[in-house]
Amino acid sequence: MSKEEKMLSAFSNILYIKEGIRLSPTQLKSTKADNILPQEVLDIIEKYKEYFNKIEEIVEFIDSTRNPYGIYDVVRKYALANGKIHYKDIKIKDEIIKVEDYYEPNNPEEYVIVMIDHIGLISPEKNYDTGIPMTLHESIGKLSSDYLIKLRNRFKYIPVVIQQQAAAQESIENKKYNKLKPTLDGLAGNKETQRDANVVVGLFSPFRHEIPEYLGYDVTFFKDNIRFLEILASRDGGGGTICPLYFDGAVNYFKELPLPDDGEKLHKVCNFIKNIRKK
């Protein structure tokens, strides 16, 4: 996705959350003569101009750098421009050398989140010792277990990696045995990335696999408006926890669903979805 597409998706989400206005990124473009945005909507968008500008200010989209070291280098340069590395002396035999001790950010309240969407699209790079090009598997491993861990441990940055499931995860055999949901074993490109993560979360759409009912929910009604978020692994516990979610792809919106046995609340959600589908 381009920067423009991602920003339009963010704008759609904000307008929906803040004002209840449900406009997809395509509608925001107003590209069709019969779908021009009304003035009142344009006025609301203008009201949030400063808010949108702030998003563009704090979020940097980088689509020109895709190899592992290049990604690390871009983030490291940001860290050095916005903080300082402190060094300490250590003695090795009769020689005193300086090594990195800790990093001090200029703004201790800043949280830097490094999002990679998605890791399977990175560009393989050469092995700097042998000069031989790495495979995609090796490059993913290098980025995850070397560079991203350095960014996390050294600078206290927060890497968030999107990694798809392998095509084999959606095989006829897996469908036969009802093993279609995301798993650690099904990570595409390199399964070993799970070892580097503090938390691994999977997002599952049963509608995509023509599953009529899932965990007590009527997927034939919800269709593409339902997802299931599962904690696949966590260093702090909680693995296996599943959260059902209402999903509206037009505005990139998620909200926790009532439990399937809570008829009253679930009925309200279903009516809400019916009303949206009528529009």
Image (cartoon, rainbow, N blue to C red):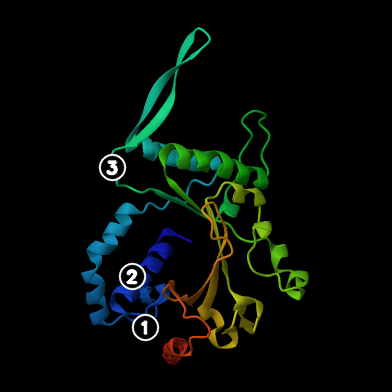
Marks 3 and 1, the one that precedes in the sequence: 1
Q: Is residue 52 left or right of residue 88?
A: left
- Vertical arrangement, residue 245 with respect to residue 189, above or below: below
Categorize mark 1 by other alpha carbons within 10 Å: few (<14), some (14-19), many (20+). Answer: few
Horizontal and vertical percent position of residue 5: 43, 65
The residue shown at (57%, 45%) is 144
Where 198 sits versus 245, above or below? above
Amino acid marked by disc 3: Asn
Q: Which residue is mark 3?
A: 107
Question: Residue sitting at 44 percent across and 76 percent down?
Answer: 250
For marks 3 and 1, give the CA distance: 45 Å
Q: Residue at x 22, y 76 (%)?
A: 43
Distance from the alpha carbon under mark 1 to that under mark 2:
20 Å
Pointer 3 with pointer 1, Cβ within 8 A: no
Q: Earlier in the sequence, mark 2 or mark 3?
A: 2
Label 1 close to label 2 by CB (< 8 Å): no
At x 57% / y 49%, what residue is drawn? Answer: 122
Left or right of residue 136, residue 59 in this image? left
Q: How many marks?
A: 3
- Graded by Cα atoms within 10 Å as few (under 14), some (14 to 19) or many (20 or more), the crowding at tag 3 reads few
Kind of element beneath mark 1: helix
Q: Which residue is mark 1?
A: 35
Residue type at tag 2: Ile
Q: For the residue marked with disc 1, what is the amino acid? A: Asn
Q: Residue furthest top?
A: 94
Q: Which residue is mark 2?
A: 14
Q: Earlier in the sequence, mark 1 or mark 2?
A: 2
Please name whichever residue, 179 or 50, is drawn nearer the observer in this view of the structure.
179
